[in-house]
C-alpha cells in the first residue's frame, strides 16, 4: 500500500501477524511488538514496535506490511530472527587462549547471535591475543546456519602466530651494564613480551633508577625492533639529577619515612617544588604513630654529586590526648557533650581507637563535623577555627575554638508548585526546630528525589529563606515538568532462562512512572535470583525521550552449576567431610536443585533441596522443600531421622521476617527404654508432623561475623497427630542476641529459652519423658554452655540420670536424657589482637529441666572462659576453654572446644 494512501490515525488494526521463521515463540514477538487488533493505526506505534523487537535481541531486522482486511488494515511483521547458538567450538588455540577468547566473545549456547556483535567481539579478542604477546594473532569465524531450526553452529578458528620473544635489551641515555639493566627490568632472555610484561619492565626500571638516587628519572618505551634472535626492547631514559637524602634531628621510623617519601624506595617520583607537601606527609606519618606534636621541615640544597634533600624532624614523645575542649563555647556542658559526640579523636588516644587515626587531616574533619553539628542546632553563623594541640601534663589538650553567633529557629515552611496526586514527603523541617542551610538543602534534595521517583525526571526545586531576628521562613519553589511513564518493558533474549521468569521478577509495568529507584530495585531483584552475573536496564533506542519511555532489561546469565567439597575438624564432630552439587537455574525457571552430604563421627546427613525464589515461589514467597536422611550419634544413644520439610518465607528480608515451616519425619531412636517417651517405646518408628511459624527481627550488620545489632527469634512448633503422625505437643523457643562495639572490641549478649508442652502420656510422668527424644532440649557444648561437654548440662534426677547398670552412679557418670524446659545466657567480650586474630572472654550460664514447673534459678550452672578467634570470610574459627565456676564432685574442671562459627 502506498504511504500516501495509508489512513494514519483513522483506520483500525484488524489483525497482527508475525512471520518469523525459526522463532522459538512467535506469540511472544507479537506481545513485544505491542500493537493489538482494535488499535487505531499509528505511525509512531509501528516504529516503536519495531524498535522493541530489535531491542529484544531475538530479531535482527523487521519490516511491517499493511494489507486491507475487513474494515481496516492487517499488520504483517516480517521478522528476521537472530539464530540461536547451538554449538560453540574453538580450534587452533591452546586451552588458556581459548578461555581468553571466550571471555571476550561472551557467546553463550542457547542465546541469539548477532553477526555485527560477533565481529566487534572478535576484534576485541584479537587485540587481547596481541596484548598477550602474539602480534600476528588472528581469529576467523565459521558459521553454519540452520534456518528451519533457527540455530547456528559457531566455530572460531584461531592462529596465534609467532610470539614476541625478548632477546636483547637497551636503554639509551643510561650508562648501565647489560647485567644491571636486565636485573633492573627483572626479565630474562626468552621472555614473551606481553603488554603487561612491557609495562612492568618500564615501571621496574624506573623504580631501580629512583632507588639509585635518580628521583626524577623518566623512561619511555619499550620500543620493539625485530632481530634474528627474537625482539630487541629499547628504552629511552632521561635520568635527571642525582639526589641524596640527609636526615637531621630526631630518628625517623623507617616505615614512616617510606610512607611519606615513596621515591626513596622507588615507588614514585620526586616532584619539583613539593618540599612543603612532603613535610606535611611525613608529619602525618609521625602523627599516625603517636607523635602528635611532631615538627618536620624539608629543604633542598646543591651537593657535589648533584642535589640533596634535607629532612629535619623534631618529633617529641608519644603523647595521648588528655581532653577535648571548645574555647569560646558558653558554659553549657550539654552542648559541649553533644559536640564531643561528633569528634572522632577522644581522650586516651595515642594512635588508634575504634579504627580512628589522629592526624591533621582527621582533626580537620572533626572541625568540619563540629561546624555542621552547630549549624544543625541552629547556629547558622557558627565559626570553628582550626584545631590546636596544646601540651598539657603528660599529654596534649585538643582544642577547637568556637564562636557560636546567634541561634535561628524555623518559622514557616511553604511548598509551591507541587503537582496534584503526588503525596508530599515528610520534610526534615518543622516550625520551632533549629534552622540550618544544611536542613534546608536536605529538604530541597528530598523533594527533588521524590518527584524524580514519582515520574518527573526533569523536576527542579529551588529553596529560599527569609530570616528576621532569630526566625527563618523557608520556601520551596517546585517546577515538576511533565510526568514520564513507562511505555513498555522488553526482556532481551536469554540463553537458558525463560523470559517469563524475568518478566515476573523484574516488577516493572507499562503505565508506571519512570522512576530510577524502581529500576534499581528491579535490578536487585533479578540479581538476587543468583542466575545472572549482571543486569542492565536501559531505555530502548529511539524511545529515550518524550512522555512515554520504553525499557529493555538485559540480564547476563551466570554459570548455573556448582560443585563443592570441604573438610574440617572440631572437638565435637571430629573429622568432618562435606560436599554438594547444585543447579541454580533448573529448567530455565530460576529454581534450584541441590544435593548435599555431610559426614562426621557424630552426624551422617544426606539432603535433597528444591528452592523457588521470591515472586516465583508458593504464594509469592520463597519456597524451600527438602528431603533428608540423618543419622546422629549422641553420648548415650543414636537417632535416625528421615523426612521432608517445606518452608515459606524470605530469609533475606530485614529487619522483620516471617517464616512458616511444615515438617514431617520418621524417627527411629535406639536409646534405653527409661530414656524414651511412651510413644517411642510403643512404636519402633515414630512419625511426627508439625507446623512452625517463625518470627525474626534482625538488625545485625553481618550475618557471619556481626559486630553490632540484634537478632530476636520466636518459634512456635505445633505437632499434630495427622497424616498417620503420632506425636502431639507444643514447643516454644525464643532467642535474643545483641552486639555492641566498645572501641575496637565487641560486647555480645545472648539469651535463649524454650519450653515443650506434651499432650500425651500420663500426667504423673515428667514432661521430658512424654515428648520424643528428638524434640527435647539438650545443653552443653560449643554453642550453648562451654564449661560443659556436649549435651552434659542438666539437673541430676531430672535431665541427668544414672544408667540402668549403675543406679547409684557418681555425678560424673550421669547421662543426659534431655529436658522440656531450657534457659541459657551468654556474655562475651571479643577483643582484636592482631589482624584477623582476636581474643574472647566469656561467661555462660543456664540449665535444662524436666518441665517448666521444675524450673528454678538456683539450678543455673555457671562457667567462664577464655578463647582465641580467627576471623575468616565465612565466620570465626574459635579455640575456647570454659571453667566450671560451681564444680560438683566428680565433674571435670572445664572443657576445651575447637569450633567454627559464633556460639550464639
Image (cartoon, rainbow, N blue to C red):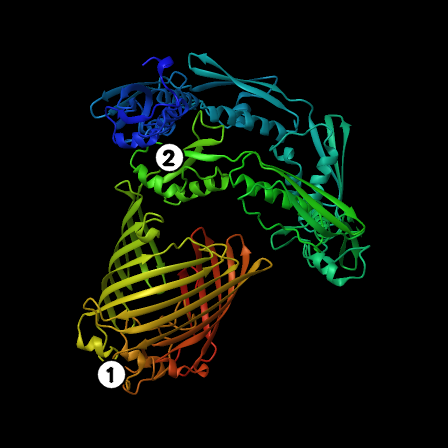
User: In the visual, does 544 lie left or right of 214?
Assistant: left
Q: Nearer the viewer, residue 401 or 321?
A: 401
Rendering quarter of residue 91: top left
**Cα–Cα span, label 2 and label 1:** 65 Å
Q: Position of residue 767 (x, y in %)?
A: 31, 80
Labelled disc at residue 718 = none
Categorize mark 2 by other alpha carbons within 10 Å: few (<14), some (14-19), many (20+).
some
Can see residue 462?
yes
Which sits earlier in the primary sequence, circle 2 or circle 1? Answer: 2
Q: Residue at x 72, y 25 (%)?
A: 305
Residue receiving disc 2: 556
Query: Up-down: is 202 above or below 471?
Result: above
Q: Nearer the viewer, residue 788 or 311?
A: 788
- View extreme (front): residue: 71
Categorize mark 1 by other alpha carbons within 10 Å: few (<14), some (14-19), many (20+).
few
Q: Residue at x 30, y 19 (%)?
A: 65
State the quadrant of the C terminus: bottom left
Labelled disc at residue 804 = 1
Q: Position of residue 365 (x, y in %)?
A: 69, 46
Amino acid at each position: 500500500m502506498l504511504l500516501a494512501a495509508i489512513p494514519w490515525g483513522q483506520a483500525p488494526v484488524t489483525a497482527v501477524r508475525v512471520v518469523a521463521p525459526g522463532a522459538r515463540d512467535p506469540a511472544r514477538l507479537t506481545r513485544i511488538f505491542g500493537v493489538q487488533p482494535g488499535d487505531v493505526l499509528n505511525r509512531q506505534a509501528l516504529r516503536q514496535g519495531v524498535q522493541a523487537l530489535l531491542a529484544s535481541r531475538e530479531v535482527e531486522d523487521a519490516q511491517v506490511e499493511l494489507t486491507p482486511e475487513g474494515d481496516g488494515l492487517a499488520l504483517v511483521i516480517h521478522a528476521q530472527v537472530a539464530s540461536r547458538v547451538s554449538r560453540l567450538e574453538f580450534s587452533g588455540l591452546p586451552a588458556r587462549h581459548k578461555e581468553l577468547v571466550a571471555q571476550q566473545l561472551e557467546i553463550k549456547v542457547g542465546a541469539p547471535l548477532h553477526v555485527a556483535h560477533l565481529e566487534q567481539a572478535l576484534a576485541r579478542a584479537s587485540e587481547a591475543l596481541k596484548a598477550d604477546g602474539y602480534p600476528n594473532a588472528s581469529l576467523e569465524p565459521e558459521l553454519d546456519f540452520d534456518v528451519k531450526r533457527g540455530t547456528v553452529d559457531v566455530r572460531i578458528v584461531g592462529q596465534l602466530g609467532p610470539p614476541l620473544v625478548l632477546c636483547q635489551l637497551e636503554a639509551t641515555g643510561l650508562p648501565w651494564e647489560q647485567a644491571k639493566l636486565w636485573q633492573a627490568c627483572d626479565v630474562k632472555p626468552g621472555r614473551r613480551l606481553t603488554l603487561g610484561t612491557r609495562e612492568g619492565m618500564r615501571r621496574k626500571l624506573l623504580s631501580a633508577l629512583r632507588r639509585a638516587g635518580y628521583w626524577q628519572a623518566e623512561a619511555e618505551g619499550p620500543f620493539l625492533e625485530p632481530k634474528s634472535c627474537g625482539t630487541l626492547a629499547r628504552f629511552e631514559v632521561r635520568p635527571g639529577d642525582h639526589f641524596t637524602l640527609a636526615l637531621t634531628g630526631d630518628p625517623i621510623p623507617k616505615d614512616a619515612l617510606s610512607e611519606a617519601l615513596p621515591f626513596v624506595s622507588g615507588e614514585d617520583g620526586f616532584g619539583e617544588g613539593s618540599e612543603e607537601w612532603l613535610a606535611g606527609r611525613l608529619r602525618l606519618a609521625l602523627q599516625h604513630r603517636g607523635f602528635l606534636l611532631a615538627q618536620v621541615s624539608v629543604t633542598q640544597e646543591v651537593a657535589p654529586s648533584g642535589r640533596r634533600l634535607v629532612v629535619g624532624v623534631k618529633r617529641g614523645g608519644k603523647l595521648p590526648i588528655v581532653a577535648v575542649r571548645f574555647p569560646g563555647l558558653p558554659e553549657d556542658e550539654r552542648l559541649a557533650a553533644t559536640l564531643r559526640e561528633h569528634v572522632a579523636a577522644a581522650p586516651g588516644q595515642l594512635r588508634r581507637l575504634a579504627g580512628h587515626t589522629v592526624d591533621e587531616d582527621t582533626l580537620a574533619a572533626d572541625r568540619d563535623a563540629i561546624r555542621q553539628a552547630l549549624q544543625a542546632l541552629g547556629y547558622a553563623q557558627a565559626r570553628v577555627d582550626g584545631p590546636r594541640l596544646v601540651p598539657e601534663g603528660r599529654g596534649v589538650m585538643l582544642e577547637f575554638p568556637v564562636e557560636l553567633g546567634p541561634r535561628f529557629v524555623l518559622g514557616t515552611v511553604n511548598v509551591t508548585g507541587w503537582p496534584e496526586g503526588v503525596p508530599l514527603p515528610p520534610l526534615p523541617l518543622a516550625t520551632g526546630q533549629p534552622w540550618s542551610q544544611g536542613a534546608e538543602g536536605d529538604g530541597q534534595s528530598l523533594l527533588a528525589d521524590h518527584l524524580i521517583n514519582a515520574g518527573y525526571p526533569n523536576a527542579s526545586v529551588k529553596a529560599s529563606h527569609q530570616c528576621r531576628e532569630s526566625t527563618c521562613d523557608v520556601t520551596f519553589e517546585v517546577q515538576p515538568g511533565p510526568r514520564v511513564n513507562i511505555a513498555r518493558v522488553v526482556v532481551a533474549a536469554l540463553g537458558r532462562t525463560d523470559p517469563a521468569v524475568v518478566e515476573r521478577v523484574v516488577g516493572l509495568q507499562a503505565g508506571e512512572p519512570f522512576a530510577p529507584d524502581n529500576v534499581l530495585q528491579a535490578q536487585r531483584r533479578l540479581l538476587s535470583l543468583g542466575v545472572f552475573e549482571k543486569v542492565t536496564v536501559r531505555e530502548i533506542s529511539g524511545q529515550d525521550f518524550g512522555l512515554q519511555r520504553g525499557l529493555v532489561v538485559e540480564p547476563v546469565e551466570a554459570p548455573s552449576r556448582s560443585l563443592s567439597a570441604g573438610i574440617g575438624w572440631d572437638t565435637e564432630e571430629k573429622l568432618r567431610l562435606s560436599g554438594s552439587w547444585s543447579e541454580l537455574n533448573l529448567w530455565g525457571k530460576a529454581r534450584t536443585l541441590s544435593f548435599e552430604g555431610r559426614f562426621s563421627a557424630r552426624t551422617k546427613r544426606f539432603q535433597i533441596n528444591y528452592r523457588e525464589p521470591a515472586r516465583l515461589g508458593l504464594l509469592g514467597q520463597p519456597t524451600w522443600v527438602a528431603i533428608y536422611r540423618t543419622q546422629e550419634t549422641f553420648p548415650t544413644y543414636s537417632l535416625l531421622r528421615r523426612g521432608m520439610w517445606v518452608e515459606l518465607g524470605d530469609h533475606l528480608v530485614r529487619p522483620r521476617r516471617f517464616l512458616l515451616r511444615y515438617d514431617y519425619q520418621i524417627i527411629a531412636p535406639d536409646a534405653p527404654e527409661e530414656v524414651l517417651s511412651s510413644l517411642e517405646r510403643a512404636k519402633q518408628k515414630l512419625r511426627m508432623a508439625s507446623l512452625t511459624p517463625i518470627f525474626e527481627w534482625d538488625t545485625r550488620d553481618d550475618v557471619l561475623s556481626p559486630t553490632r545489632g540484634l537478632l530476636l527469634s520466636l518459634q512456635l512448633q505445633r505437632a499434630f497427630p495427622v497424616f498417620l503422625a503420632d506425636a502431639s505437643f507444643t514447643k516454644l523457643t525464643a532467642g535474643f542476641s545483641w552486639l555492641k562495639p566498645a572501641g575496637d572490641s565487641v560486647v555480645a549478649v545472648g539469651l535463649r529459652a524454650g519450653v515443650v508442652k506434651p499432650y500425651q502420656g500420663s500426667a504423673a510422668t515428667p514432661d521430658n519423658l512424654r515428648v520424643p527424644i528428638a524434640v527435647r532440649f539438650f545443653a552443653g557444648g560449643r554453642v550453648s554452655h562451654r564449661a560443659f561437654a556436649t549435651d552434659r548440662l542438666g539437673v541430676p534426677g531430672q535431665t541427668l540420670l544414672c544408667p540402668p547398670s549403675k543406679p547409684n552412679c557418681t555425678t560424673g557418670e550421669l547421662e543426659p536424657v534431655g529436658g522440656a524446659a531450657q534457659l541459657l545466657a551468654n556474655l562475651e567480650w571479643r577483643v582484636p589482637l592482631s589482624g584477623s586474630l582476636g581474643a574472647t572472654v566469656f561467661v555462660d550460664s543456664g540449665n535444662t529441666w524436666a518441665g517448666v514447673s521444675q524450673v528454678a534459678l538456683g539450678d543455673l550452672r555457671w562457667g567462664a572462659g577464655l578463647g582465641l578467634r580467627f576471623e575468616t570470610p565465612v565466620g570465626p574459627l574459635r579455640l575456647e576453654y570454659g571453667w566450671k565456676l560451681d564444680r560438683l564432685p566428680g565433674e571435670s574442671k572445664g572443657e576445651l572446644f575447637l569450633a567454627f562459627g559464633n556460639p550464639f
